[in-house]
Image (cartoon, rainbow, N blue to C red):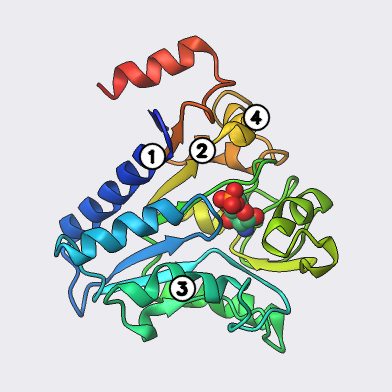
Amino acid sequence: MRVIIKPDYESVSAWAAEYIVSKINAFAPTENKKFVLGLPTGSTPLGVYRELIKMYKEGKVSFENVITFNMDEYVGLPADHPQSYHYFMFENFFNHIDIKKENIHILDGMAKDAQLECENYEKAIAGCGGIDLFLGGIGEDGHIAFNEPFSSLTSRTRIKTLTSDTIKVNSRFFDYDISKVPTRAMTVGVGTIMDAKEVIILANGVKKAKAIYHGIEGAVSHKWTISVLQNHQHGIIVCDNEAASELEPDTIKYFKDIEK
Ligand code: GLP
């Protein structure tokens, strides 16, 4: 695992955006060979999206031949609901770049047959040859996508019931009204994320410090689903000093030294 520790949120976002752009450009995607990018929502990736939009506008990257798959979506929120992850993605990223609409994939939280929707999502990912790079954030309890604690570490795309902790944390997007937060979500599984050729997880702020500690220094455990990244051949955690603040000084020294 690589761990990149940056001083603040801005430098975390800039590092991740530059890394993603370098990967897309090295891949040199074409109409017949598209780059497949997995994407998250949440407040953490907003800085990366801003940087990617800036780099697109400066002509440093194109998303014309990039296919995207989002991690998750709330069950029961239509695409035009301001708190749906559909709405979030178009508002904060897709509307500002040259991605083709047909290359965007987001789970449909209103699907009549949710199970089938999840199965088809896995098939669509496989049909594109798998995900080249999956970008993600983490919850305070270490969840990746909506894979709450004790999710199977080999899970696939499915419906998950959200924990009361996650509902409480996410209520900030719903006027702090817990009753407005959907109680279920569709999410790619831990196994789906682990199948990506590369995974980058972002974390900033002291609220994520415990999850980062368990993800990096703890044992691989379904209690902290982020910890499974230890088993990925190309896993990268990019975090700021605050999120790294529960790591042992030796751990921080090791990762800083090796990245010099
Ligand atoms: C939600 C999302 C996750 C995200 C997490 C953290 O639970 N399903 O994908 O990583 O929130 O969000 P934030 O970045 O706002 O802290």
Q: CA distance from mark 4 to mark 3?
A: 31 Å
Q: Are marks 2 and 1 in contact (CB under 8 Å)?
A: yes
Q: Say whether disc 4 or disc 3 marks the residue closer to the N-terminus.
A: 3
Residue 58 falls left or right of residue 182? left
Other-residue count near label 2 (Cα within 10 Å), few / some / many at <14 / 14–19 / ≥20: many
- Of the pair 240 and 64, the residue shown nearer to us: 240
The residue under the point 59% across, 63% down is 188
Q: Which residue is mark 4?
A: 210
Residue 145 seen in the current view: no
Other-residue count near label 4 (Cα within 10 Å), few / some / many at <14 / 14–19 / ≥20: some
Q: Say whether disc 3 or disc 1 marks the residue closer to the N-terminus.
A: 1
**Image quadrant assignment for residue 60:** bottom left
The x and y percentages for residue 93 are 39, 68
The x and y percentages for residue 70 are 50, 67
Residue 206 seen in the current view: yes
Q: Hey, which residue is sitting farthest top in the picture?
A: 250
Q: Which residue is mark 1?
A: 12
Q: Which residue is mark 3?
A: 91
Disc 2 element: loop
Disc 1 element: helix
Q: Which residue is mark 2?
A: 204
Label 3 is placed on what type of residue?
Glu
